Image (cartoon, helix red, strand yellow):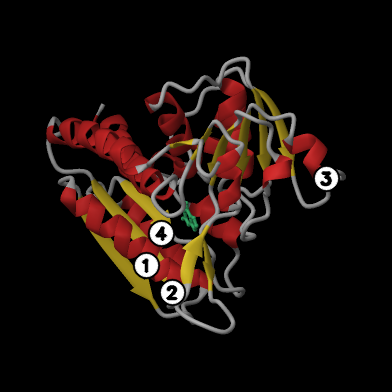
Amino acid sequence: MRGSARILAGVPVADAVLREAAVRASRLPAPPHLVMVRLGEDPASVSYVRGKDRKAREVGLTSTVYALPEETSQAELLDLIARLNADEGVNGILVQLPLPPHVSEQAVLHAVDPHKDVDGFHPLNVGELWAGRPSLRPCTPAGILALLAHYGLPVAGQRAVIVGRSHIVGRPLAALLLNADATVTLAHSRTPNLTAVTREADLLCVAVGRPHLVTPEMVRSGATVIDVGINRVKPELSGKAYLTGDVHPDVQDVAGAMTPVPGGVGPLTIAQLLVNTVHAAEMQAA
Ligand code: GUN
């Protein structure tokens, strides 16, 4: 019996989130202004930034993209960030990751004004998040909470297992779920007997970047499965590259609910970035 899981499509949730962002943006004296910076031409980064830029304009925000050469020095990047911090016409700043190896990610994330840090990656925002009083919340984790709320899926009291301890998804998602009263386990590549851990989950979130890492026997019957992976796979013999998640499609047979890839968490990441930009503009206007 294939596909008994309820499919948690992200687009309708993102649309609802974006409608609210557009209404809030329209109440501000000027359209919120998001500035995105990317270095080099990594295809995934180019595509992500293009998608964010397009959606920002669609909902009535102002969006500027700095597409800088790969060789841009750290000093030049920090200088640009300092100018954007000082510019009152800029409400949100996002530096697309990953950065080339000659640029320190830590130095860059520290440099962004925490009030304009629409990624929620500045250590001050990370600290506030773990202290239980988040302001600008990392986009993908916040999008996942919006998705769960939209579909009426409970978080409080649930046993949540996250696989993947990245700074972008796993760690901040652990904090948000903890703040929402889940019992949280953060598993990773060094977790022994991963299957025994994931089978405990009422809510299983997977953010590793390995196609089909999670197979049906790793999932408890009826669990909610959130697949954050977006992996580009190219079949060896035939055909075109395609996108697939960290969760094997057969998990649909055992899960109670599951996000698709693509079209699950992805659209929510963008929507939450724009909400954060509106939120940053509201705070700066207050
Ligand atoms: N690269 C992959 N995801 C993200 C994200 O959420 N923010 C930034 N800045 N870079 C990313």
The quarter of the displayed image where residue 245 is located: bottom right
Residue named by callout 2: 43
Q: Is residue 5 left or right of residue 191?
A: left
The quarter of the displayed image where residue 54 is located: bottom left
User: Which residue corresponds to the image point at 45% horizontal and 51% vertical from the top-left?
Assistant: 112
User: Label 4 crowding class (10 Å Cα cut-off): few <14, some 14-19, many 20+?
Assistant: many
Element marked by disc 4: helix
User: Is 130 in front, or is 162?
Assistant: 162
Which numbered circle lies on residue 191? 3
User: Which residue corresponds to the image point at 41% horizontal and 31% vertical from the top-left?
Assistant: 146
User: Is 27 in front, or is 200?
Assistant: 200
Amino acid carrying label 1: it is Ser
Per the model, the C-alpha gap separating discs 2 and 1 is: 6 Å
Question: Which numbered disc, 4 or 3, marks the residue that appears first in the sequence?
Answer: 4
User: Which residue corresponds to the image point at 58% horizontal and 60% vertical from the top-left?
Assistant: 105
Q: Is residue 199 above or below residue 239?
A: above
Question: Which numbered disc, 4 or 1, marks the residue that appears first in the sequence?
Answer: 1
Residue named by callout 4: 81
Per the model, the C-alpha gap separating discs 4 and 1 is: 22 Å
User: Label 2 crowding class (10 Å Cα cut-off): few <14, some 14-19, many 20+?
Assistant: few
Per the model, the C-alpha gap separating discs 4 and 3 is: 38 Å
Question: Which numbered disc, 2 or 3, marks the residue that appears first in the sequence?
Answer: 2
Instruction: Name the front one of labels 4 and 1.
Output: 1
Per the model, the C-alpha gap separating discs 4 and 2 is: 23 Å
Per the model, the C-alpha gap separating discs 2 and 3 is: 31 Å
- Residue 225, percent from left and from top: 57, 38
Element marked by disc 3: loop
Assess whether mark 2 and mark 4 are in contact (beta carbons under 8 angstroms): no
Residue named by callout 1: 47
Amino acid carrying label 4: it is Ile
